Image (spheres, rainbow, N blue to C red):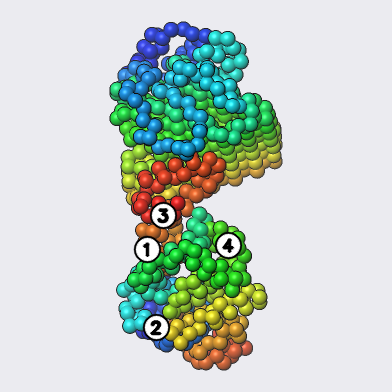
């Protein structure tokens, strides 16, 4: 047993039982049996966790030392706009979570809800699974202290921000943020999960978000990784969609040292539609590993995946996506488009779009390309008199446009664009295009 | 204005140009014709400074300067313009942004201040009207989703905004219907000026009914094998390129 596993087990033994104990028990037993994923596991073949496994971890405290300066990190909203923000420190729900009132939302802590409505919570904890992409979710289920449950009851136009703050005294601490987003039939909202670091070091962050969309519900969901360069972040997102529901999901990797981001979408009923956008920026020695699995489990379901990966310096970016069309999911319609742009000879991008089809009469397309800047485009711009740096920057910017233009929260788009540009070569030139 | 002497060039290890000689004076319009694969587009791209096209011999001077020693962007700023046979689509880069950046790069090189945003938009609208282009052009990406005809109009529009001293138009007429051909020709003719020169690279004589050349050259096997006045174009149309080949042999 690795040092990490021993420390997880010690934490498990030390914790007090709560209302979720049966679920936790199952998850922990399975996790201990399976162990940490290794390079031999299908979705982990590009990310080596051996150095992580050699460490011991203790639970991170759910509070900030010193004062939290919101200006210190990237701000995704207009300073003027009154955007409701929930702050979660190392996964701890705000103490007053149950008292927070935001129009169109019902908010509570998962722990509080588990005490009086245990049965309705169960559906947000799917059965334990041996799948390697779900390994860390098992640990999260077992060890998460408390999390946030957000019920969307109305049609909300103002975005809601969840600011996840990672903070601690050492990287040998461990946090398990857990969020449940439950959209009632016909409800709609925009939710931005924003991950930042406070202070020099950050705990190992193992976060999980579960989204359930009722009939005809609509959600625009963002997860923005903007943690510090030393941070390790393992994040999983599960989306379950009912009939006619629509989800637009943005995954933006702008920070962190090691980021592992997974998405598993279940299009469970007909007419469910998912648009997933991934913007993965490799910078310095960052390692970004993104796995998308989209299951079409019903007829007339639709998915679109657009991924753009940029790698500079000695960074590495991985994007694996898999579309599974289950038997009976006739007229499923899926597209996967992944493009990678290498900006340095020592950077690396790996992409792998996959299809697994068990139904007839489906429409599935996928494409993946990785390369350097297109020499024809570059020559065209140079032949118009643009200097080389400007021409290159312009093409990099254009490369990202497909993802950025899909965002409907303009303030978030502007902030993300700004942060992104600062991590690209020739950022001064790029700023002029904004 | 342009003096090409014994120019030979190679693309992907293959010799394409084999000793081109050509002199273009200010105020003139030259047409370079020739069969497919004769090296017409290679000549245009070499003159514009495409780096992966290797010049193996010869020299080119542009207004007395050594053109081959200049980078593509320097050539553009010095007043050379290439109208592409296949204009590149660049989604995400706005047409107007490109035009403005191009114009400012040229002005900066000439020691002039950047163009005023308001004046610039007025200028673009005026040129767009002249080229009979739709307003939607202003918000679209460079050549993004343009039809063949729209792309060619866009090339001419860029040329009109940049006002080059030497315009090299590579098959700007190909793929155009007769109305579009007239608009494009009008654009080219509007640039005719005693201080400028135009080189039309074309496969067909059709364009030359609207833009009357001072000289016509036939490029074959990477060399100019015959030169003459505009009547040469008509003769080529009637007798085909084989006729010139026979003459040379």
Q: Position of residue A387 (x, y in %)?
A: 37, 63
Sequence order check, earlier mark of 4 and 2: 2
Q: Residue at x 48, y 26 (%)?
A: A86
CA gap, disc 3 and disc 4? 21 Å
- Badge nearest the viewer, 2 or 1: 1
For disc 4, the marked residue is B137
User: Going by the image, does B17 lie left or right of B131?
Assistant: left
For disc 3, the marked residue is A432
Chain to which mark 4 belongs: B
Q: Quadrant of residue B240?
A: bottom right
For disc 1, the marked residue is A387
CA gap, disc 3 and disc 1? 14 Å
Chain to which mark 3 belongs: A
The answer to whether residue A19 of the structure is visible from this angle is yes
Q: Position of residue A341 (x, y in %)?
A: 43, 49
Q: Secondary structure at mark 2?
A: strand
CA gap, disc 1 and disc 4? 24 Å
- Badge nearest the viewer, 3 or 1: 3
């Amino acid at each position: 047993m690795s040092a990490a596993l021993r420390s997880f087990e010690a934490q498990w033994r030390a914790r007090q039982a709560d209302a979720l104990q049966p679920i936790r028990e199952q998850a922990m037993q399975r996790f201990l049996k399976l162990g940490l994923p290794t390079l031999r596991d299908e979705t982990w073949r590009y990310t080596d966790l051996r150095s992580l496994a050699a460490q011991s971890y203790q639970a991170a405290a759910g509070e900030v030392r010193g004062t939290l300066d919101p200006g210190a990190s990237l701000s995704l909203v207009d300073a003027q706009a009154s955007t409701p923000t929930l702050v979660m420190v190392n996964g701890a729900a705000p103490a007053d979570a149950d008292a927070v009132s935001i129009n169109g939302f019902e908010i509570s802590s998962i722990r509080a809800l588990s005490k009086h409505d245990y049965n309705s919570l169960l559906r947000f904890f799917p059965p334990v699974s041996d799948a390697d992409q779900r390994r860390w979710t098992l640990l999260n289920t077992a060890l998460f202290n408390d999390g946030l449950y957000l019920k969307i009851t109305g049609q909300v136009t103002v975005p809601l921000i969840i600011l996840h703050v990672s903070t601690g005294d050492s990287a040998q601490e461990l946090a398990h943020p857990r969020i449940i987003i439950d959209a009632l039939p016909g409800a709609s909202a925009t939710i931005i999960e924003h991950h930042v670091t406070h202070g020099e070091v950050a705990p190992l962050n193992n976060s999980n978000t579960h989204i359930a969309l009722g009939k005809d519900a609509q959600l625009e969901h963002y997860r923005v990784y903007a943690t510090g360069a030393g941070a390790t972040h393992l994040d999983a997102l599960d989306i379950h969609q009912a009939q006619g529901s629509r989800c637009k999901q943005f995954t933006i990797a702008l920070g962190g040292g090691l980021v592992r981001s997974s998405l598993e979408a279940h299009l469970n009923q007909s007419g469910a539609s998912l648009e997933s956008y991934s913007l993965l920026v490799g910078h310095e020695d960052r390692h970004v590993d993104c796995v998308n699995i989209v299951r079409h489990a019903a007829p007339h379901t639709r998915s679109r995946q657009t991924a753009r990966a940029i790698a500079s310096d000695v960074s590495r970016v991985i994007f694996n996506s898999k579309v599974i069309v289950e038997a009976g999911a006739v007229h499923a319609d899926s597209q996967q488009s992944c493009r990678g742009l290498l900006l340095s000879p020592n950077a690396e991008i790996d992409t792998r779009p996959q299809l697994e089809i068990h139904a007839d009469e489906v429409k599935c397309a996928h494409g993946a390309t990785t390369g350097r800047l297109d020499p024809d485009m570059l020559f065209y711009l140079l032949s118009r008199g643009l200097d080389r740096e400007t021409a290159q920057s312009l093409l990099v910017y254009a490369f990202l446009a497909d993802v950025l233009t899909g965002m409907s929260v303009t303030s978030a788009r502007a902030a993300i664009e700004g942060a992104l540009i600062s991590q690209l070569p020739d950022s001064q030139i790029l700023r002029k295009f904004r | 204005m342009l003096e090409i002497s014994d120019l030979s060039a190679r693309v992907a290890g293959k010799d394409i140009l084999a000793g081109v000689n050509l002199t273009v004076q200010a105020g003139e319009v030259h047409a370079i014709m020739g069969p497919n694969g004769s090296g017409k587009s290679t000549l245009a791209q070499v003159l514009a400074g495409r780096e992966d096209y290797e010049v193996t011999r010869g020299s080119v001077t542009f207004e007395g300067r050594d053109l081959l020693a200049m980078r593509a962007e320097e050539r553009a700023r010095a007043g050379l313009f290439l109208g592409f046979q296949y204009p590149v689509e660049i989604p995400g880069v706005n047409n107007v942004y490109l035009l403005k950046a191009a114009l400012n790069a040229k002005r900066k090189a000439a020691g002039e201040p950047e163009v005023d945003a308001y004046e610039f938009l007025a200028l673009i609208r005026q040129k767009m009207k002249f080229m009979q282009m739709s307003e939607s052009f202003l918000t679209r990406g460079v050549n993004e989703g343009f039809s063949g005809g729209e792309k060619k109009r866009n090339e001419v529009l860029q040329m009109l905004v940049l006002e080059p001293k030497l315009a090299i138009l590579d098959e700007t007429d190909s793929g155009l219907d007769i109305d579009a051909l007239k608009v494009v020709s009008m654009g080219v003719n509007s640039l005719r000026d005693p201080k400028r020169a135009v080189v039309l690279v074309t496969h067909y004589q059709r364009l030359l009914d609207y833009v009357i050349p001072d000289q016509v050259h036939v490029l074959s096997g990477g060399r100019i094998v015959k030169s003459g006045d505009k009547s040469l174009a008509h003769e080529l149309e009637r007798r085909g390129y084989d006729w010139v080949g026979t003459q040379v042999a």
